[in-house]
Image: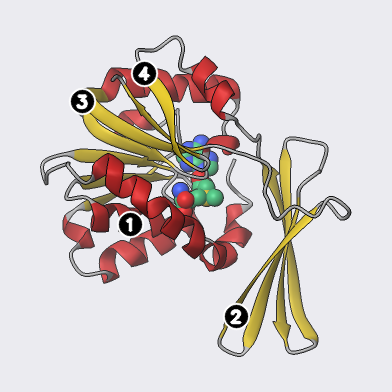
């Protein structure tokens, strides 16, 4: 279920610029050798921030799978307004693992960025089994995994991010210790000292570690190795 992204979508990109700039060197190191006939499956492409980085750092085509309609709308706007993206990116409505069959043929790369926590273990294992069947022998994938956020304030169990857009300041207040496999974030819009509105969003998020991913991949021919902070490459080599 991705219904909570209906509300979250408005605020999603405000706080994803930095994570994607941090991911960019990993994207380049994993995918820069791919040629224009290669295909990268981007699972849970969101609004397409990563799709754009993929297109900039690789010559490959991208099959961008995204289940949530609001996120997909933003993705479609990006793909149709950034020059050249519409020739390389296909937007696919669907979720993993149920709709992976929509991505036909073999793939030469894949990305699961900031999304594996939305899947439970059986769903991740189905996804990895599909990748094992579908990824070319030389293919590589890039996944992000979880550590405790260094910005975590242990007294409040909150991480606060801020971003100014025009006259307004946007704040994301993440509650980290919900005691459940959930994330809980309150987005606030401030005009100076006045809070104009506040939107609370909760959804399923099961933080997944590198060790867990390694164990889940054990039944496949795929191996995982860390290549950067909270980033791993997956492949057969
Ligand atoms: C935090 S966003 C990250 C989006 C993008 N990967 C990025 O890094 O900018 C997580 C995305 O995963 C999508 N998602 C959630 N469950 C999914 C599933 N089962 N299959 C594919 N995508 C899923 C959500 O709709 C959302 O767009």
Q: Is residue 160 left or right of 66 when viewed as pictured? A: right
User: How far is mark 1 from mark 3, CA to CA?
Assistant: 22 Å
Q: Is residue 154 visible?
A: yes
Asked if the beta carbon under badge 1 is closer than 8 A to the nearest atom of ligand 1, the reply is: no
Mark on residue 138?
Answer: 3
Q: Residue at x 56, y 64 (%)?
A: 15
Seen at 50% across and 56% down, the residue is 19
Q: Which residue is mark 1?
A: 53
Tell me residue 149's x, y (percent). 67, 48
Does label 1 or label 4 sit earlier along the sequence?
1
| Mark 3, other Cα within 10 Å: few <14 / some 14–19 / many ≥20 | few
Is the residue under label 1 in contact with that under label 2 (CB below 8 Å)? Answer: no
User: Is residue 104 among what the camera can see?
Assistant: no
104 w.r.t. 177: above or below? above
Camera-nearest residue between 13 and 150: 150
Of the image marks 3 and 2, the number of the one nearer the N terminus = 3
Q: Are marks 1 and 4 in contact (CB under 8 Å)?
A: no
Write the residue at 41% across / 49% down: 45
Lower position in the chain sequence, tag 2 or tag 1: 1
Q: Which residue is mark 4?
A: 222
Viewed as shown, does residue 99 lie left or right of 108? Answer: right
Of the numbered discs 1 and 3, the one sitting upstream in the chain is 1
What's the CA distance linking mark 1 and mark 4? 24 Å
Q: Tell whether 7 sits left or right of 185.
A: left
- Residue 147: horizontal and vertical position, in percent? 63, 39
CA distance separating discs 3 and 2: 43 Å
- CA separation in Å, label 3 and label 4: 11 Å
SS at mark 3 in the image = strand
Instruction: From the image, tell me which residue sits under label 2.
Output: 164
Q: Judging from the image, what secondary structure is the residue with disc 4 in?
A: loop
């Amino acid at each position: 279920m991705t219904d909570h992204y209906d509300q979250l979508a408005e605020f999603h990109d405000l706080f994803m610029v930095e994570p994607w700039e941090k991911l960019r060197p990993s994207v380049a190191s994993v995918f820069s050798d791919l040629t224009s006939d290669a295909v990268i499956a981007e699972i849970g492409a969101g609004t397409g921030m990563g799709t754009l980085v993929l297109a900039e750092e690789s010559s490959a085509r991208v099959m961008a799978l995204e289940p949530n309609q609001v996120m997909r709308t933003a993705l479609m706007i990006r793909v149709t307004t950034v020059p050249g993206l519409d020739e390389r990116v296909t937007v696919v409505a669907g979720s993993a693992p149920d709709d992976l069959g929509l991505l036909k043929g073999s793939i030469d790369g894949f990305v699961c960025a900031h999304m594996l926590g939305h899947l439970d273990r059986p769903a991740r294992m189905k996804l990895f089994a599909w990748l094992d069947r579908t990824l070319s022998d030389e293919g590589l994938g890039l996944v992000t995994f979880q550590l405790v956020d260094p910005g975590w304030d242990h007294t409040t169990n909150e991480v606060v991010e801020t971003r100014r857009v025009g006259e307004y300041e946007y704040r994301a207040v993440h509650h980290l210790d919900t005691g459940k496999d959930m994330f809980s974030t309150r987005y606030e819009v401030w005009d100076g000292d006045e809070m104009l509105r506040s939107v609370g969003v909760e959804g399923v998020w099961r933080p997944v570690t590198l060790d867990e991913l390694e164990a889940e991949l054990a039944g496949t021919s795929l191996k995982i190795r860390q290549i950067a902070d909270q980033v791993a490459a997956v492949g057969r080599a």
